[in-house]
Image (spheres, helix red, strand yellow):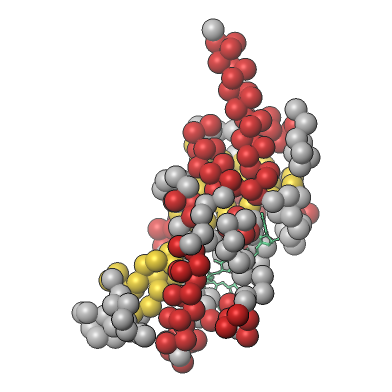
């Protein structure tokens, strides 16, 4: 089967035969929804900042009001965005393979809005508010520049994992188990520069999985991968899905 974005038939066959597919997504999967990636230059007020400088506990301690303005700007941007065909293809893929584990570095909820279930949020969720001191979840008072914890009176913070902070234990454990168990690992829309997320592909490879990258630009890890598909996730994933569906209809026919 020929595809517009040059997906090798060997890869389609590997996915058709897969028992457990583990997917890691990054900001690139949300790019076609209009959500800027971490490496895209931010626009307007935020153009003067690098996200890596804002997404840290120190930045919050120094200027919590600035950090809350940034996250509220991102919440508004994401709320006005819609899942794209790549998100929907991943949600549908879970119906076509025996076991699918979705690990996302994204905090934008777009996988869930596209219908994916049991999403492992490796870096938390943009829409959760947490007590800075003890991590307990609360609903922030939006009228305050810096919302406060109703229990301890300290500052609330967005429920994401910042640079220098540990990955939530359950998310780390579930992701590592899935990467070590899967027979196909798809790394989609990530620059593979942030650890430990970027280490999952290697963990999968060291446990015998076929590892695949889907990204318009090859990343530093591409040379270690079995397949590197140069394309946008919103284009490549629906085509991968179609090739799998072709097999299913063929299989159903042979079962008649
Ligand atoms: C940890 C949530 C240890 C927040 C994010 C010094 C001190 C401490 C740690 C470190 C240190 N030095 C290095 C580290 C490790 C650090 C790290 O990796 N730093 C990097 C910069 C080197 N990691 C950490 O700090 C992690 N924690 O190590 O803890 C520890 C242990 C115990 C106790 C205490 C501490 C935590 C990292 C989590 C940071 N939080 N997000 C928020 O969102 O505000 S990271 C954030 O950036 C994203 O979540 C994502 O993970 C990352 C951006 O990466 P990508 O998703 O890949 O996005 P990017 O823009 O880079 O690339 C987009 C890609 O898409 C591109 O390749 C592009 O080509 C492609 N693309 C574009 N369009 C499309 C497309 N692909 C497909 N289709 C398209 N249409």
Say left or right for 6 vs 142: right
- Farthest residue in the top direction? 256
* Left or right of 66 on screen, residue 186: right
Front-lying residue, 252 or 113:
113
Specify the quadrant that holds the C terminus. top right
Task: Kindly identify the residue that appears in the image at 59 percent across and 61 percent down.
Answer: 34
Which residue occupies the extreme left position in the image? Answer: 151
**Residue 156, x across and y down, in percent:** 33, 79
Spot occupied by residue 101 in the image (x, y as percentages of width and height)? 50, 45
Above or below, 102 relative to 138: above
> What number of labels is visible?
0
Looking at the rendering, the quadrant in which ligand 1 lies is bottom right
Q: Where residue 81 sits: x, y (%)? A: 51, 59
Give whichever of 16, 74 is nearer the camera. Answer: 74
Can you tell which quarter of the image residue 48 is in?
bottom right
* Residue drawn 53% across the image and 81% down it: 54
Asked whether residue 87 is in view, the answer is yes
Which quarter shows the N terminus? top right
Viewer can see residue 164: no
Q: Is 18 located above or below residue 224 in the figure? A: above
Q: Is residue 211 above or below residue 25?
A: above
Farthest-out residue, bottom? 62
On the image, the x and y values in percent for residue 47 come to: 63, 81
Q: Which residue is pictured at 31% across the width and 81% down the height?
A: 143
């Amino acid at each position: 089967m020929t595809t517009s974005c040059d997906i090798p038939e060997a890869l389609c066959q590997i996915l058709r035969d897969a028992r457990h597919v583990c997917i890691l997504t990054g900001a690139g999967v949300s790019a076609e929804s209009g959500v800027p990636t971490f490496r895209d230059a931010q626009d307007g007020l935020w153009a003067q900042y690098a996200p890596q400088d804002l997404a840290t506990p120190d930045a919050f301690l120094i200027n919590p009001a600035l950090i809350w303005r940034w996250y509220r700007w991102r919440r508004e941007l994401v709320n006005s965005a819609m899942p794209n065909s790549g998100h929907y293809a991943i949600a549908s893929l879970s119906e076509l393979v025996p076991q699918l584990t979705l690990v996302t570095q994204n905090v934008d909820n777009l996988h869930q809005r596209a219908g994916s279930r049991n999403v492992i949020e490796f870096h938390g969720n943009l829409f959760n508010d947490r007590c800075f001191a003890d991590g307990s979840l609360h609903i922030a008072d939006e009228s305050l520049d810096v919302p406060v914890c109703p229990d301890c009176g300290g500052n609330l913070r967005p429920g994401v994992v910042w640079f220098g902070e540990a990955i939530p234990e359950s998310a780390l454990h579930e992701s590592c188990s899935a990467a070590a168990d899967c027979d196909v690992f798809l790394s989609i829309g990530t620059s593979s520069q942030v650890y430990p997320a970027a280490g999952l592909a290697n963990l999968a490879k060291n446990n015998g999985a076929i590892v695949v990258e889907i990204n318009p630009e090859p990343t530093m890890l591409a040379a270690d991968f079995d397949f590197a598909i140069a394309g946008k996730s919103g284009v490549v994933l629906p085509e991968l899905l179609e090739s799998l569906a072709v097999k299913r209809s063929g299989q159903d026919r042979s079962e008649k």
